[in-house]
Amino acid sequence: MEYLQFERGLSGNTLVAYERDLHKFSEITGKNPLKSGAEEVSELLRHMHKSGQSAKSQSRILSALRGFYNWAQEEEFVEANPTALFENPRDARSLPVVLSEKEVQKLLDIIPLDGQFSTRDKAIIELLYACGLRVSEACGLKRSLLRLDEGYLIVTGKGNKQRLVPIHKEAIKYLELYLEHERILTAPQANHSDTVFLSNRGAALTRQSIFMKLKRFAAMAGIRKNISPHTLRHSFATHLIERGADLRIVQQLLGHESITTTEIYTHVSAKHLGEKIAAYHPLNRLYSK
C-alpha cells in the first residue's frame, strides 16, 4: 500500500478499493496471495461471475491483483505473476444517464435559497454541472486553490493530479455568496480550515451528503431518472460535445488520463443526433403521413 501511495501516487479512494480487493481475494481463496497462483485467480473470477458481479468489478479486482503481483515480483517475493495469462473481462459499456439541458435548468431553478446552508447547496450543484467535477473533487475543493477573479479553479483529481477548470459566472456568483455569507458562520475543524464546503459540524461535506441533497432536489424538480452527482458530470460533458466542443478539450476538463474514457460521450451524442434525425428528417415526416 505504501508503494501504491508514494511511488504510484494513487488517490486515497483507489488505495481503499485496492486493499479491499486484495482482502477479498484472500477471503475467497483462503490463501495468502503470495502463496497463490493462476488456479486461485481463476477461482476468484469464477466466484465473482457466479455471484453476478459485473465485468467492470471483475476487471477492477484483476487490475488490483496484477499490480500487487508486479510489485511482488520487483521485490522478489514471487517468481511469476499468476495474472499474466488473464485478460480483463469484456464489459458491454452502457451509456451513462444524462439530463437534458431543460432538466438541468429545472434542477438548478428548484433549489431553494431561503434555508440554512441553502446557498452552499446551490453552489455545490451549480459547480458540479458548470465544471463537470467528480463529487469527491467538490468535497475536497480548497479555498486556496480558487481563482474566482480569474474565472477558474485548481482541482485535485485522481492520483492527486491537479488541473485548471474554467468556472461559469453563475457558479461563481453562488460560490462567492456562500463564502461571504454562510461559510463564515461555521467554525471549521482544525484540519478543514481550507476546505470550501463545510458541514454544520465544520468538517468537509461527504459524498453521501451531496448525493442525498441532489436526490431531494431532483424529486422536487419532477425528474424521474435515477441520477447521482456523477450524472451532472456526464451531462456537462455530453452537452459540451453536442454543442461542438473538441473531444480533447473535454478530456482535459474532466481530467481523464485516456481519451478512450472520454469517447463514451461521443456515443451519447450520436444517440442525441439520431433522435434529432428521427424527429426532423423529411423522409420520416413523409412516410408518417
Image: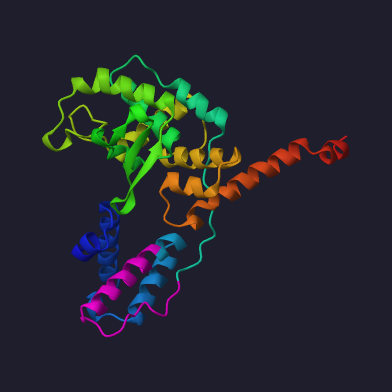
In the visual, does 228 lie left or right of 24?
Answer: right
Is residue 77 part of the magenta span, yes or no? yes
Rendered residue at 46%/63% (across/down)? 55
- Which of the two residues, 169 or 97, is positioned nearer the viewer here? 169
Residue 86 lies, with reference to residue 153, above or below; the image says below
Q: Is residue 31 among what the camera can see? A: no
Q: Is residue 152 among what the camera can see? A: yes
x%, y% of residue 81?
32, 80
- Which of the two residues, 33 or 105, is positioned nearer the viewer here? 105
Rendered residue at 40%/61% (across/down)? 57
x%, y% of residue 77?
20, 80
Q: Quadrant of residue 145?
A: top left
Is residue 208 part of the magenta span, yes or no? no
Rendered residue at 19%/20% (across/down)? 185
Q: Quadrant of residue 66?
A: bottom left
Range of magenta residues? 60-87
x%, y% of residue 115?
31, 16
In the visual, does 144 lie left or right of 264?
Answer: left
Please state, as top left, top right, bottom left or bottom right, where the N terminus lies in the image.
bottom left
Residue 55 lies, with reference to residue 253, above or below; the image says below
Rendered residue at 64%/46% (across/down)? 271
Please state, as top left, top right, bottom left or bottom right, where the C terminus lies in the image.
top right
- Which of the two residues, 129 or 98, is positioned nearer the viewer here? 129
